[in-house]
Image: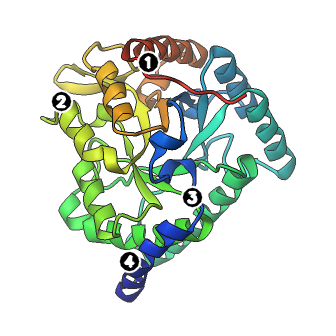
């Protein structure tokens, strides 16, 4: 995004916040508009299943919401979803009582102008499908940023993110950026900086995932305090230290994370979005992995945390 364009965006943002009808993820005070959070599951952990089968299992297990993975190599990528199939899946979501909370896209910002333009076109296709599947309340679109070296890349990130924000404003849809262990964008404070440079635009928010901050001298309470004002989506998975390296596991498996406190703090702070169970590729790529069993374990562990935390859940239907 050119500097002049970024300045125009910054000037227009305040008016956009006041005047546009926005999704549930950027409402000024979610706590007054929605009761409880949703407990969801991401189809990222069900790559071997057709989307329809994944949704059926997710609903039967008892989840309230679903994050659909729409990357190009997934069954639910826009190119694999013609109009008839989109209508069918929209009806399946409604009949199953599932909120469509998020699309996992994972499009890395590029310093190459041609690649950036190509990425914007790709996002337009994802936005179109978001409205096809949930026309009244489209899911947010989340991504990590990849790369290395925050200081060298942060201005490029800001430039590209400004264009995404304009696309979000035009289409009334939220992009959520995810600080990721090992990536150039890896801390909540860095997401705060990017969004702050764009005058706290409501069209760019953050995905909170403590598994990427654990074992990095980043206490959970501190990261929640930093992230809560800009968090639109929460991914739930777990991390252990094995042979001197971190390894992702299913949420609740390590016993190291205080998910009860996490739920209570976000709920008290007004968050009313999704708590989406995410199965890491480190887990689902293992021989013998069973996506249905994994989803059931996630539900058992996280539903118990909801209950012990005293945080209400909501479900469609």
Q: What residue is disc 4 on?
A: 10
Element marked by disc 4: helix
Q: Can you name the residue that lies furthest to the front here? A: 32
Q: Whole-percent x and y of residue 34? A: 54, 38
Q: CA distance from mark 2 to mark 1?
A: 24 Å
Q: Earlier in the sequence, mark 3 or mark 1?
A: 3
Secondary structure at badge 2 equals loop
Q: x%, y% of residue 216?
A: 16, 35
Q: CA distance from mark 4 to mark 3?
A: 18 Å
Residue of label 3: 22
Q: Furthest residue to the left? A: 217
Image quadrant assignment for residue 55: top right
Quote the CA–CA distance across marks 3 and 1. Answer: 27 Å
In the image shown, does 34 or 149 lie closer to the viewer? 34
Tell me the residue that label 2 is attached to: 215
What residue sits 45% from the left and 54% below the top? Answer: 28
């Amino acid at each position: 995004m050119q500097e002049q364009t970024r300045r125009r965006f910054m000037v227009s943002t305040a008016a956009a916040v006041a005047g546009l009808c926005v999704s549930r993820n950027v409402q000024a005070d979610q706590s007054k508009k929605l009761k409880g959070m949703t407990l969801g599951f991401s189809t990222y952990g069900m790559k071997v299943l057709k989307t329809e089968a994944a949704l059926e299992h997710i609903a039967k297990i008892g989840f309230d919401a679903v994050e659909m993975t729409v990357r190009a190599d997934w069954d639910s990528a826009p190119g694999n979803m013609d109009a008839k199939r989109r209508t069918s899946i929209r009806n399946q979501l409604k009949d199953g009582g599932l909120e469509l909370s998020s699309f996992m896209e994972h499009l890395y910002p590029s310093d190459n102008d041609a690649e950036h333009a190509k990425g914007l076109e790709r996002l337009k296709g994802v936005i179109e499908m978001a409205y096809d599947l949930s026309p009244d309340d489209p899911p947010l679109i989340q991504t990590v940023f990849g790369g290395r070296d925050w200081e060298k890349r942060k201005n490029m990130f800001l430039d590209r993110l400004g264009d995404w924000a304009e696309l979000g404003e035009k289409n009334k849809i939220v992009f959520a950026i995810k600080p990721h262990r090992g990536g150039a964008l890896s801390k909540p404070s860095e997401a705060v900086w990017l969004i702050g440079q764009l005058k706290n635009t409501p069209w760019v928010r953050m995905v909170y995932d403590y598994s990427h901050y654990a074992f990095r001298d980043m206490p959970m309470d501190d990261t929640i305090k930093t992230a809560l004002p800009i968090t639109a989506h929460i991914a739930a998975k777990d991390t252990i230290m094995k042979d001197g390296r971190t390894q992702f596991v299913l949420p609740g498996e390590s016993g190291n994370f205080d998910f009860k406190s996490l739920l209570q703090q976000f709920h008290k702070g007004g968050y009313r979005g999704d708590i989406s169970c995410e199965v890491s590729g480190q887990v689902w790529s293992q021989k013998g992995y069973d996506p249905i069993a994994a989803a059931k374990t996630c539900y058992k562990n996280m539903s118990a945390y909801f209950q012990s935390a005293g945080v209400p859940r909501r479900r469609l239907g």
